[in-house]
Amino acid sequence: MRTERASLSYLIFAVFVSFGMLSGVWVFFVLACITASLLVVSSTMAPTHPELRGRRILSDDKTYEDGRVDVKLMIKNTGNGTFFRIIDGVPEGGEVEGETHKIVYLRSGSTVVLNYSLRFPLKGKYRFGPVRIRCFDPMIFWIREYRIDLRDSIDVFIGAEDLKKVRLEPTKTRNWLGTIRSRRIGIGTEFYSIREYVSGDDMRKINWKGSARTGKILVNEYEGENSGDAIIVLDAKEEYLAGTESRNTFKAGVRATLSISSHMLRQRNRVGLILLGDYLTWLYPEFGRRQLYKIMEALSTIKKGGKWEFDTLYWIITRFFPANSYIIVISTLQGKEIPDTIMELRARGYDVLILSPSPVAIERAVSEDDAEHRLAFRILEMERENVMDSLREKALVIDWDINTSLAEELKLVRRFAK
């Protein structure tokens, strides 16, 4: 492709020839010859179709928010040597450190390497674009553009908060081994009682001190430790969210969802997930690390939305999820249908914990402190408190100021029974 510089040179050549013929001055013909020689030389050095091979190496294709990923891009020229401008297709939203483009002369068989790092402040799936190549002659009279389609992506997840010191567990257990004390004799580590030995008892359970003191063989009984089902619900209705782009109730809710899921899966419970956002997504309760990866994947792609009302939750849980599950709802509690839905779930025998990121607290932190705003926030606080008081009759409600850690708020949680 001819550049504007080449077109201007052709125009200058024509002007010099015209002036020379009209005026008969030989200087114009000399200048025209010089211009023509430049055009001829540049045309002989014009780039042909490039023969390039590319490879992009990522230090990791998964990371957490504010995590760093190192990128190495290698381009090898297997054709004729010429000048190249190489531009990597960096994902939008990533903060770049290093060189993502370079102008270089590549001889046949030589390789150029670009090294840079990316940091992603927000969760999501980030895709690299194709590598754009522009080859040109030394005078930039002729340019040829080319693309190398290298398909790579990076999944950025919300970081989970450590909840090891938090006592958060399902209120009804199943007959699966776990960490929840069942208050019944079974397999566990906590002492329950002592009884006389019967044939078939494990010798390791014999209480030797008690046996020596009583003259009878006694064995220890232990309290069974089981696990249960938990369903975590994240209400991501856009019109109910508050805060700035970097710090808001939506981001806090996603982080809390992942933190609680990780904590309860580590306790060997089954954990399910329901996301009410731009799309309706749910995961049936399962055990283990694989389920955690599924939850992380779902949370990395969730978008704020308003297509699904909160009362859809009742229909999904009662038809597709196990009975007697422990339901943990993460919501700002601004939907009018939320109290009725919670009451219906409690009537069906589900125990409910509500973790509510406070939109009032976060908006107050970014608003002006004047009489008008103080009055408005006072009214909003009273309305919010009325909703939470009505819900506290049937569920455990936590008013969460996201400026405090999730672990501190959940330390107040105790097993909630009917």
Image (cartoon, rainbow, N blue to C red):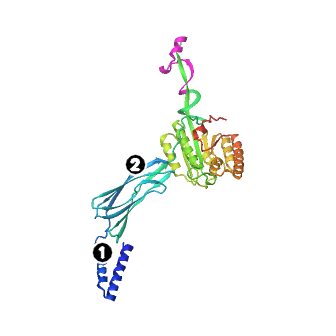
User: In the image, what residue occupies the spot 27% across and 61% down?
Assistant: 108
Q: Dot 1 corresponds to which residue?
A: 38
Where are the magenta residues, as a range? 186-213
Q: Which mark is residue 59?
A: 2
Residue 387 appears in the figure: yes
For residue 18, what is the image quadrant?
bottom left
Residue 212 counted in the magenta span: yes
Q: Is residue 416 magenta?
A: no
Residue 328 pos. (x, y %): 60, 42
Q: Is residue 279 above or below residue 258?
A: below
Q: Residues within 10 Å of mark 2 (few under 14, many from 20)?
A: few
Q: Nearer the viewer, residue 35 or 318?
A: 35
Quadrant for the N terminus in the image: bottom left
**Front disc: 2 or 1:** 1
Asked whether residue 321 appears in the rendered view, the answer is no
Q: Residue at (50%, 43%) from the top-left corner?
A: 292
**Tag 1 secondary structure:** helix
Amino acid at dot 2: Ser
Within-10-Å neighbours for mark 1: few <14, some 14–19, many 20+: some
User: Taking 4 as reference, is 374 left or right?
Assistant: right
**Mark drawn on residue 297:** none
Q: Report the side of 172 relative to 300 (left or right).
A: right
Q: How many marks?
A: 2
Q: Which image quadrant: the C terminus?
A: top right
Mark 2–mark 1 distance (CA, rounded to whole Å)? 46 Å
Residue type beneath disc 1: Leu
Q: Please state the horizontal and vertical placement of residue 46, each as a whole percent of the image.
A: 31, 70
Quarter holding residue 73: bottom left
Residue 388, given in percent of the width and then of the height, sits at 69, 43
